[in-house]
Amino acid sequence: MSDRRRVLICLLAVFFANLCGAQTTSAGPELRIAAAADLQPVLPPLLTEFENQTGIHAAASYQSSATLATQIINGAPFDLFLAADLSFPQRVIAAGLSEETEPIAYARGTLVLWARNDGRFRSLSMDALKDTALKSVAMANPEHAPYGRAARAALEHLGLYDTLKPKLVIAENIAQTAQFVESGNADLGLISLTSAITPRLRASGHYVPVPPDAYPPILQGAVILKHPAGTQPAHRFLDFLASAPIQQQIEAAGLAPAK
Amino acid sequence: MDLQALALTLRLAVVTTALLLAIAVPLAAWIVFTRSRLRALVEAVSTLPLLLPPTVLGFYLLVLLGPRTALGRAWIHLTGHPLAFSFSGLVVGSAIYSLPFAVQPLVAGFAGVDTALLEQARLLGASRLRLLRQVLLPLSTRSVLTAAVLCFMHTVGEFGVVLMIGGNIPGATRTLSILIYDQVQDFAYAQANRTSLLLVAVSLAALVLLYSQRRPALGEARRG
């Protein structure tokens, strides 16, 4: 019994030593980014490159723009908000959480219609949405996710929203939308180009761009949040994002330049 | 107040509770009275959803029971639609997720029944079903009630699984917990507050009702 207790105490000691260790290893400046879910396939390699260039460790949390705005307004500790539209950064500015007066447009998103290769839609066009055998179409929540808002606008523009309404499956953000359709649970998905051109989705399915005139442009806005230690790292990240090689990289990952 | 979401949530909770009691009563009786070596494993599996995060369940329901597996295709063949994004899918998810809340109180209740009474009934020639219906259940009403109320409330309060497999469809999968999440996301704090307060009030009332049942005094339980 006493042997067992000794082992337990040793384990606890190691456990607490690790806990303490984890807290002291964070040396150097840090940048915490609240990033829209369409950036999930785009941002990780950029964060590594940014850290290599500047020594600033950057970490991102991915959610729908609305979820992130709610969290930021309620005190979530982020330094930079990369949203998928301009309205959610504007809300954050209106809440007095930034020195800026306007969000900075850093990219433009593209909406695509995606289907699995092994599904019903071998050759895909927007007409697939009129197929009567269609059971479900995944889209992001129009209230929370700018891509969802664009999807609803596009369906309304094409005169399909009312007929499709019972077949719409609403995902919490654009990354979950891709997952609903990639897993085969939904027949079609209105997803972001950033998801559609990842190697995984390229291998399992195919896409057509939704006609750009069918929805208002998905202008993605950034806002730098107030930080007691200064906003230097966030400014450096936005400069990095605007640099020519990174802009090229972003475009290859499915985000068009903002202008 | 979204009455559709309220009605859906109540329907889900009623169906899940009924299904769970039907499964958990025989299961709990088996756990208490079996001499099988599998008892520990079965009891462990029935408790597992208590410590697994809902994301594990949501993930497996979505992918393992999705249209890309044989199991998922069998489900589609039977019901005509995938498990995800449907009311029946939510029932399956909720039933698994709330299983421990049905089994645990029933196991405790059945284990507290005097074995001498069961022995006498058996000697008098009562079948297993009769033992369950006329001895075990009447002596464990409080446990059955506890199991039912806990299953019901746990299903009402479920969020993670529904978020992962529901698809937020009004009338089919948009439950109160999802509605509150949506309202918070939309900065509709007043509405979120109303919906949340309703849930707090209903849950509290159910629990007060449950706990106001007179507890049998020590020793009284043995006599029934």
Image (spheres, rainbow, N blue to C red):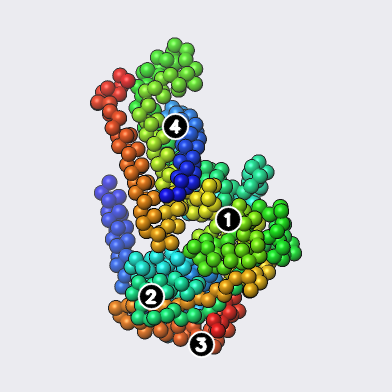
Judging by the rendered image, the residue that carries numbered circle 3 is A243
Looking at the picture, which amino acid does disc 1 mark? Val
- Determine the CA span between mark 1 and mark 3: 38 Å
CA distance separating discs 1 and 4: 38 Å
Q: Dot 2 falls on which chain?
A: A
Residue type, numbered disc 3: Ser
SS label for mark 3: loop
Q: Kindly report the distance in space between the C-alpha atoms of the residues bearing marks 4 and 3.
A: 65 Å
Q: Find out whether the residues at labels 1 and 3 contact each other: C-beta distance under 8 Å.
A: no
Q: Residues within 10 Å of mark 3 (few under 14, many from 20)?
A: few
Q: Circle 2 sits in a helix, a strand or a loop, which is it?
A: helix
Query: Residues at badges 2 and 4 in contact (C-beta under 8 Å)?
Result: no
Residue extending farthest right: A123
Up/down of B98 relative to A17, above or below:
above
Q: CA distance from mark 2 to mark 4?
A: 56 Å
Residue linked to disc 1? A169
**Is B206 located above or below residue A241 in the figure?**
above
Q: What residue do we see at 31% from left, 73% from top?
A: A24
Q: Nearer the viewer, mark 2 or mark 4?
A: 2
Q: Position of residue B29 (x, y in %)?
A: 45, 28
Compared across the picture, whether B6 is left or right of A15 comes to right
Look at mark 2 in the image and give the residue it sits on.
A93
Between marks 1 and 3 in the image, the one whose residue lies nearer the viewer: 1
- Chain for numbered disc 1: A
Given residues A150 and B65, the one toward you in this image is: A150
